[in-house]
Image: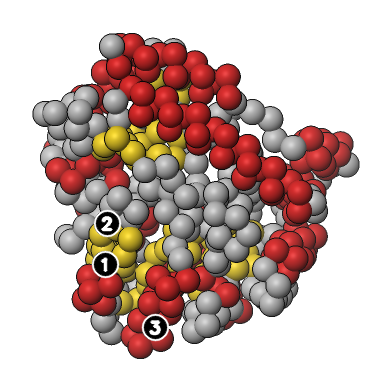
């Protein structure tokens, strides 16, 4: 297999489960697909952080409250007995609110809430439902590496063949020749994540124009994860939705969710926005994956979509403060880094601190000895060697939490 879900996800692992037997039971047999990747390294680091009472900068969830408007709307919906199934592909009020918010935020982008939106159980389900609906076994899917750890397994579960294109540091730019070589008439989709997890890259107009050119030439879909759309540090116009790029309007599936923008990662309310024929297929797959997202939380999503423009400006500025605090602390501790342009993660080079380059061992040592959790870089690469000198830290935390991490990291510097 070329590529996959990262060092811990893209390789077939040895397993004793296949041939083991329980007391008086048959041999345990798991699918070849399930053997191709392991559980999430990010979630594993969270469990390790809990065991050692570490500051968890591994998993990207906020430790501060969501907007009061969302909580009030959710409570009101429960009090009103909004307890049964919503329409499978999303409550009409939420779909209308999503379409209206898109139109306000990106003038000229018009979305039909009746035929072009599918509400899902978070962006995670939105992405796998889109792949299962639109990608056939044997199709090729281009993934930019380093990548968020779910995309490789999503492609594998869809029966697709991942094709990897490296983002080049320090600014994580696309190598045009490499992307052109990866795209062909066998390519069904390119997965874009902007702003990007784990690097913090924001794809610019020239890069998106290149993707548009190749997508039109080879009849390729673009699956774009824009869950961090409002978390960037480039000012107005810094984030460009691929669906607004000439040539991509009719071939882009946009994935998004309440999770990051509104600090409700546990609510699991996401959605896709796509041309009607693609949405119809996604809705069918979504129906049989999860039936639907939580009805009272969809009602709260309407309140989220109606927040004023000032909310998003304050969100970005608050994250800028968190970014600057954590990046300064990491640099003082001896990490090498480039402050991210978007999202809420920073990729750090550990060469000075870990010259042997064992990212997994070093990350676990940080948890056990210093009480700070990050994510080993190898989990974002198909070849583990490519991430051995890298750790990702997240900063969706209260300033007090980040200062606590800063205090602990001073011990590493000594």
Q: In the rendered image, which residue does mark 2 sit on? A: 168
**Classed neighbour count for the residue bearing mark 2: other residues with Cα under 10 Å, few (<14), some (14–19), many (≥20):** few
Residue 309 visible somewhere in the drawing? yes
Q: Is residue 410 left or right of residue 274?
A: left
Could you say whether the residue bearing mark 2 is in a helix, strand or loop?
strand
**Classed neighbour count for the residue bearing mark 3: other residues with Cα under 10 Å, few (<14), some (14–19), many (≥20):** some
From the viewer's side, name the closer residue of 138 and 211: 211
Could you say whether the residue bearing mark 3 is in a helix, strand or loop?
helix
Q: Give the Cα separation between the discs numbered 1 and 3.
A: 15 Å
- Residue 22 location, x and y as percent? 22, 28
Which of pointers 3 and 2 lies earlier in the amino acid sequence?
A: 2
Q: Quadrant of the C terminus?
A: top left
Which of pointers 2 and 1 lies earlier in the amino acid sequence?
A: 2
Q: In the rendered image, which residue does mark 1 sit on? A: 175
Which of pointers 1 and 3 lies earlier in the amino acid sequence?
A: 1
From the viewer's side, name the closer residue of 21 and 364: 364
Residue 213, disc: 3
Q: Quadrant of the N terminus?
A: bottom left
Residue that extends furthest to the bottom in the rendered view of this protein = 217
Q: Nearer the viewer, mark 3 or mark 2?
A: 2
- Residue 164 location, x and y as percent? 25, 62
Q: Is residue 95 left or right of residue 249?
A: right
- Residue 104 location, x and y as percent? 75, 65
From the viewer's side, name the closer residue of 111 and 178: 178
Q: Residue at x 55, y 60 (%)?
A: 238
- Residues at circles 1 and 3 in contact by the CB criterion of under 8 Å: no
Q: Is residue 341 left or right of residue 271?
A: left
Q: Nearer the viewer, mark 1 or mark 3?
A: 1
Residue 65 found in image quarter: top right
The correct choice, above or below, for 65 with respect to 95 in the image is above
Q: Residue at x 69, y 77 (%)?
A: 108
């Amino acid at each position: 297999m070329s590529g996959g879900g990262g060092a811990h996800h893209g390789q077939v692992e040895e397993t004793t489960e296949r041939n083991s037997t329980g007391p008086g039971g048959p041999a345990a047999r798991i699918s070849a697909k399930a053997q191709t990747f392991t559980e999430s390294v990010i979630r594993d680091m969270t469990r390790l952080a809990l065991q050692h009472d570490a500051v968890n900068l591994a998993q990207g969830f906020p430790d501060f409250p969501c907007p009061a408007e969302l909580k009030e709307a959710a409570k009101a919906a429960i009090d009103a007995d909004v307890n049964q199934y919503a329409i499978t592909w999303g409550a009409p009020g939420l779909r209308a609110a999503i379409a209206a918010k898109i139109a306000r935020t990106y003038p000229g982008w018009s979305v039909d809430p009746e035929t072009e939106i599918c509400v899902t159980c978070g962006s995670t389900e939105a992405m796998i439902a889109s792949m299962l609906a639109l990608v056939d076994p044997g199709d090729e899917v281009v993934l930019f590496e380093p990548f968020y750890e779910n995309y490789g397994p999503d492609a594998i579960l869809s029966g697709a063949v991942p094709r990897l294109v490296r983002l080049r540091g320090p600014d994580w730019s696309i190598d045009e020749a490499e992307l052109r070589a990866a795209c062909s008439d066998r390519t069904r989709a390119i997965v874009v994540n902007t702003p990007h997890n784990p690097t913090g890259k924001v794809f610019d107009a020239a890069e998106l124009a290149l993707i548009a050119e190749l997508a039109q030439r080879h009849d390729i879909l673009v699956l774009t994860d824009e869950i961090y759309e409002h978390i960037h540090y480039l000012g107005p116009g810094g984030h460009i939705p691929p669906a607004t790029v000439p040539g991509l309007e009719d071939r882009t599936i946009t994935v998004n969710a309440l999770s990051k923008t509104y600090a409700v990662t546990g609510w699991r309310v996401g959605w896709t926005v796509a041309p009607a024929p693609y949405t119809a297929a996604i809705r069918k797959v979504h129906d049989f994956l999860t039936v639907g997202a939580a009805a009272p939380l969809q009602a709260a999503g309407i309140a989220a979509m109606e927040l004023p423009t000032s909310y998003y400006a304050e969100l970005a500025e608050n994250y800028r403060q968190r970014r600057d605090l954590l990046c300064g602390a990491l640099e003082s501790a001896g990490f090498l880094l480039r402050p991210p342009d978007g999202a809420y993660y920073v990729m750090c080079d550990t060469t000075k601190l870990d010259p042997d380059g064992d990212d997994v061992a070093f990350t676990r040592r940080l948890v056990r000895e210093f009480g700070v959790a990050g994510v080993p870089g190898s989990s974002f690469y198909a070849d583990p060697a490519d991430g051995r000198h890298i750790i990702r830290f997240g900063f969706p935390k209260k300033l007090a939490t980040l200062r606590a991490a800063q205090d602990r990291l001073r011990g590493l510097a000594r």
